[in-house]
């Protein structure tokens, strides 16, 4: 069961809600909250929005969540997947091989290089980053990345669990940070969905409960931001942005 993950540059991440999610400030007018409403996760698309103030979801993760972008990539216990597994997640970016792979994958996302890429090259760079995340999280059935030119203005993209696809707005690729943030955030939602449906995953029930009791931002913005499935996705994506910022600093 699933709904929509929407991502908007105002919230900073994805959203288990057919509306949106983002990293900026909350929507100007949120419906009054009488009690914390939740949506039963029944199917849809995780989408990201941007620039128009509509919600997105990005980087407010719960305290203690961190990102390990290196350890044992590919076995489901590496980089970021391991980071999200427990509260003590850290910032272990020391494994040489993993670091090299990650930096090579992020190379084109550096601002000076990104602007010189053709649209097709930008798409390929995002697809390559999605492949890295799939390996890092041990996702055995990674989503298809689809680029669209007719998504709503301000929408960056979203994950649809029903079709296992991530749709990216190819008209919103000017900002390399947002591009990296969008694809990694949504790939983490894809991982969460896979984990929720894996009876052998120790966190399957936790993820499924998070989806079944998903809080939409239009009902309770603070609750939406603080819920585990969104906090994790934002924190996971933030790890890549931090890594990218460090690469720029070294340049």
Image (cartoon, grey):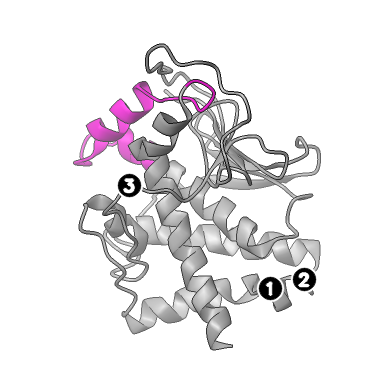
Mark 3 secondary-structure assignment: loop
- N-terminal-most mark, 2 or 3: 3
* Image quadrant in which the C terminus is located: bottom right
Mark 2 secondary-structure assignment: loop
Say which residue label 3 marks: 62
Disc 2 crowd, CA 10 A, few/some/many (<14, 14-19, 20+):
some
Q: Which label is found at residue 170? A: none
Say which residue label 2 marks: 115
Closer mark to the observer between disc 2 and disc 3: 3
Q: Is the C-beta separation of discs 2 and 1 under 8 Å?
A: yes
Q: Quadrant of residue 78?
A: bottom left
Residue 76 visible in this rendered orientation of the protein: no
- N-terminal-most mark, 3 or 1: 3
Q: Is the C-beta separation of discs 3 and 1 under 8 Å?
A: no
In the image, is 116 to the left or to the right of 45? right
Q: CA distance from mark 2 to mark 1?
A: 6 Å
Q: CA distance from mark 2 to mark 3?
A: 33 Å
| Residue 223 percent coordinates (x, y) | 39, 30
Say which residue label 1 marks: 111
Q: Is 180 rendered above or below residue 242?
A: above
Q: Say if the magenta span includes residue 15.
A: no
| Residue 90 percent coordinates (x, y) | 27, 65
Q: Say if the magenta span includes residue 211.
A: yes
Q: Nearer the viewer, residue 104 or 225?
A: 225
In the image, is 90 to the left or to the right of 99? left
Disc 3 crowd, CA 10 A, few/some/many (<14, 14-19, 20+):
some
Q: Is 64 rendered above or below residue 4?
A: below
Mark 1 secondary-structure assignment: helix
Q: Residue furthest bottom?
A: 251
Give the residues drawn in magenta, as a range. 192-219
């Amino acid at each position: 069961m699933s709904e929509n993950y929407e991502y908007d540059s105002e919230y900073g991440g994805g959203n288990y809600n057919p509306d949106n999610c983002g990293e900026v400030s909350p929507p100007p007018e949120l419906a009054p909250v009488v009690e914390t409403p939740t949506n039963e996760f029944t199917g849809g698309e995780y989408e990201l929005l941007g620039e128009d103030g509509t919600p997105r979801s990005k980087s407010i993760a719960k305290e203690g969540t961190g990102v390990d972008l290196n350890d044992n990539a590919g076995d489901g216990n590496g980089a970021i997947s391991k980071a999200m597994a427990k509260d003590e997640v850290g910032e272990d970016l020391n494994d040489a091989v993993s670091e090299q792979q990650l930096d090579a994958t992020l190379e084109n996302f550096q601002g000076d290089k990104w602007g010189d890429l053709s649209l097709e090259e930008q798409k390929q760079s995002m697809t390559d980053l999605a492949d890295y995340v799939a390996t890092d999280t041990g996702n055995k059935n990674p989503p298809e990345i689809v680029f669209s030119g007719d998504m709503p203005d301000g929408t960056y993209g979203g994950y649809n669990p029903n079709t296992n696809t991530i749709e990216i707005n190819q008209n919103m690729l000017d900002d390399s940070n947002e591009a990296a943030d969008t694809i990694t955030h949504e790939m983490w939602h894809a991982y969460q969905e896979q984990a929720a449906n894996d009876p052998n995953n120790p966190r399957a029930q936790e993820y499924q409960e998070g989806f079944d009791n998903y809080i939409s931002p239009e009902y309770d913005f603070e609750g939406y931001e603080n819920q585990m499935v969104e906090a994790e996705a934002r924190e996971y994506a933030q790890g890549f942005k931090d890594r990218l910022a460090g690469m720029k600093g070294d340049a």
